[in-house]
Image (cartoon, rainbow, N blue to C red):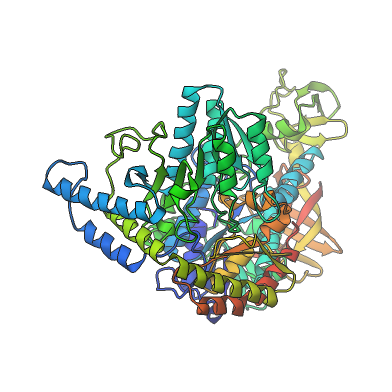
Amino acid sequence: MWCRKLRQESKRANLNDVTVSTYLDHAATTPMSDIARIAMIDELGKIGNASSLHGSGRRARKVVEEAREAIARAIDATPGEIVLTGSGTEANNLAIKGLYWKRVQEDPANNRIISSSIEHHAVMDPIQWLVDHEGAQVTWVSVNERAQLNVDELVAEIERDPKVALVTVMFANNEVGTLQPITRIIEAAHKYGIPVHTDAVQAFGKVPLSFKDLDIDALTISGHKIGGPLGIGALIVKKNLDLTPVLHGGGQERDIRSGTLDTPAIRALGVAAQEAHDHLSERAVRMSALRADLTARVLAEVPDSRSNGDAETLPGISHFTFVGAEGDALLLLLDAQGIESSTGSACSAGVPRPSHVLVAMGMSETEARASLRFSLGFNSISADIDALVSVIGGVVERARRAGQVSKR
Amino acid sequence: MSGGVDSAVAAARAVEAGHDVVGVHLALSANPQAYRSGARGCCTIEDSRDARRAADVIGIPFYIWDMAEEFRADVVENFISEYAAGNTPNPCLRCNEKIKFEAVLNRGIAMGFDAVVTGHYAQLRGSAKAPTLHRAVDHGKDQSYVLAVLTPEQIRHSLFPLGDTPKEEIRKEAERRGLSVANKPDSHDICFIPSGDNAGWLRDRLGVAEGPIVDEEGNRLGTHQGAFTYTIGQRKGLGISQPSDDGRARYVLKIEPVSNTIVVGAHEALAVSTIHGEKLRMCGPTPQGVHRGFAQVRAHGAAIACTYEFVGDALTVLLDEPLHGLATGQAVVVYDEDRVVGSATVTATL
């Protein structure tokens, strides 16, 4: 345990006080928009199980279906293609397990899954589970140093053996932001009738997305990434695509996903999806400008630093490697200054491990551990960038000093 | 913050004293067990969650620092090699010396922190510039012995808020503060041997190496499974079928790693009146000349009145009353009343 006797140095007050912070971790979660929040609070005061046949049920059902239509419009799908789930992770599990089980049932030889080496754990872990417990085989297609999928490799994998249950590649990477060549992937897979799924939780609401134009088979979105509430997500899935459900029960969502519908959250998701869609271009322009400013100024402020990712990227993500500093030290020091960011790595046994995404991009473990992600949201302002830039030099310097002290 | 009640209350007290506190849990195992129950050691994932919960209740930031590699190299490997050399190490001392108050403290200071606060039962007195280390008020819980390896510089950057309070009071205080760890049992033994079976753990790593058990005349009495699983003064587990001539119990007197021999004998042969120690760790300036004080050779052992002298890098301790069973490699800590003077590693006993 530690203390710092110079209380005034730290802007982070007691957890129980109101803290002043610069939030730069929107990729982890972003605030609910005002209208989504108001809609949800309003709905929380009302009663009705959308599956009930009486008046209260019908009222709730109407709210759900209106939200469903709003989501469908926002993603350019039909309402019948929206399956509401409890989170993006759940939607990913439903897509991956549901498609795999159905495809293998149709033809047991279709037991291969093709994915990328940079997926979020919500895709990686269901796949790995199928490998460990259901006899699936997986090919994790590699990426280049900018986290772009090596599409030729994926195409070659399909051509080599088209007995594939499904292909799943994220629309954009959550750590460094790189947009993936989804259209080429769909083209290659559809040649053999292989369904394609994409985890679009980071991309929806940030870049133009048309479910119809993409002709993709399944797509995941998440409420709390777009200004909606936590605890709600959706799988957008072609009607003719059969999925084995993960959750069995009351038969909601056309038997695909049982569980009482969370009417307040769904209503808020509909509002948020519509809002994100309506304001998409103007937000993307503003966030890109802020991002460019953040990246340039941090690089100027910190010697021996570099930014990661590709020009074709999500507008809000800015990822850096600060050679010689440990990510967890950077995080702590920034946190003490009220600046909230992320190392982007998953915690294993409570201890941060170097990100598999960065390692897949070719970074060494040391470089991967020296990395930090800043992500912007619809309410980010230039003062946030100013706050970060004013402290980042000193923070990296201290973290580097602490890094030299450790034997590792 | 280990996830135990002591470090939780220590953190709370430090906050109350006006310090700006950050909670750190040390991940020391490459493979932590998931659950606390059944683990006699420390620092399972459940422990880290308990620590995190305590930090949240107290209202301080909480982080986990990965020190598994340093811990393995400086504490676990040292533990194994000391046993292989026929010594009896104390890993908690090594951990304090190398990890908690060195690797962790140095990292903290480089990051701008001033001190490490722990839930150890010990007291600091004197000025902030030259604090002295003392026993805790609760002599049964006193942990000044394992802190005796700290240098004056390290002591200057340490705080021990619990030393002035008996343990049961600390538990009550934890409850008053709304800390759910108030009734969590203390961890025992060695944190990285959750089963408590030290001998088995060592056998897994050092293998079984059978060798003779002999008496002081060299007569073979039996066979042991590995010299490293025994310690001086041990009576149980010798597996000697024939009783001794006088019918009294036999004790391990000597462990000879080179010949893989264990020498056993009567209890009186264990008597030690003089202790030689080296590798001094002084908590303050080294006193010159001969002094009266107390010696302690186990973490919760008795303090034995003695006369001691530091000469060069060596310590000689003459006990007023002999103690029975002292192995090389153990730490001897010298006290002036209740103040820790310093410690040494036992190299010879008479």
* Residue B48 in the image: above or below residue A167: below
Look at 81% across and 68% down and name the residue there.
Answer: B289
Res B33 visible: no
Total marks placed: 0
Q: Is residue B303 left or right of residue A20?
A: right
Place of residue B9 in the rendered image (x, y in percent of width and height, measured from the top left): 47, 61
Q: Is residue A79 left or right of residue A90?
A: left
Q: In which quarter of the image is residue A37?
A: bottom left
Observer-nearest residue: A45 or A223?
A: A223
Q: In this view, does A374 lie to the left or right of A59?
A: right
Place of residue B63 in the rendered image (x, y in percent of width and height, measured from the top left): 56, 60
Q: Quadrant of residue A250?
A: top left
Q: Which residue lies furthest to the left in this view?
A: A55
* Residue B211 in the image: above or below residue A41: above
Observer-nearest residue: B112 or B128?
A: B112
Look at 81% across and 70% down and name the residue there.
Answer: B288
Place of residue A186 in the rendered image (x, y in percent of width and height, measured from the top left): 55, 42
The N terminus of chain B lies in which quarter of the figure?
bottom right
Observer-nearest residue: A98 or A195?
A: A195
Look at 21% across and 45% down and name the residue there.
Answer: A50
Res B160 visible: yes
Place of residue A399 in the rendered image (x, y in percent of width and height, measured from the top left): 68, 68
Observer-nearest residue: B271 or B38?
A: B38
Q: In which quarter of the image is residue B306?
A: bottom right
